[in-house]
Image (tube, rainbow, N blue to C red):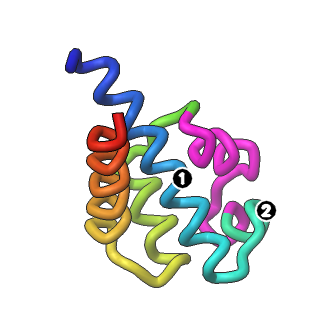
Amino acid sequence: MDLSRGSAKLRHALGKELRILRQRRGLTQERLASQALLHPTYISMLENGRKSPTVDVLERIARVLGIKISTIVASAERAGDDLDSDG
C-alpha cells in the first residue's frame, strides 16, 4: 500500500473513532468543540476524515472525552486493520 492511501485510510478510521467516542459520551460536535477550544467545523472535518489532527488537538479532544490519546489512535488502527481484512 502506498503511503498516501495508508494515511487517508487511517485518517478516516480516526475520524470515525472520534465520532463514536463523542457520541458515546453524549456530546454534540458543538459541545466537544467548545470544551476542547476548537471550532465545530473542524470537529466535523476531523470526523469525516478531511483533516488530520495534531497531537495537541488530539490531547485536547482526549481530555474532554476522558481518555488517553493512545486509546483513540489504537482504536483507529484496529478499525483500519479491519478495513484491510474486509477488502
Of residues 5 and 30, the one nearer the viewer is 5
At horizontal 31% and vertical 71% (from top left) the residue drawn is 71
The C terminus lies in which quarter of the figure?
A: top left
Residue identified by numbered label 1: 16
Q: Position of residue 81 (x, y in %)?
A: 27, 47
Determine the secondary structure under disc 1.
helix
Q: Which mark is residue 72?
A: none
In screen coordinates, is 47 left or right of 83?
Answer: right
In screen coordinates, is 37 left or right of 5?
Answer: right
Q: Which mark is residue 30?
A: 2
At horizontal 40% and vertical 64% (from top left) the residue drawn is 59
Of residues 28 and 75, the one nearer the viewer is 75
Name which quarter of the figure residue 49 lies in.
Answer: top right
Foreground disc of the pair 2, 1: 1
The N terminus lies in which quarter of the figure?
A: top left
Q: Is residue 63 above or below residue 38?
A: below
Task: Find out whether residue 42 is within the magenta segment.
Answer: yes
- Hey, what amino acid is under mark 2? Glu
Outermost residue, front side: 86
Q: Is residue 33 above or below residue 64?
A: above
Q: Position of residue 47 (x, y in %)?
A: 60, 48
- The magenta segment: 33-49
Determine the secondary structure under disc 2.
helix
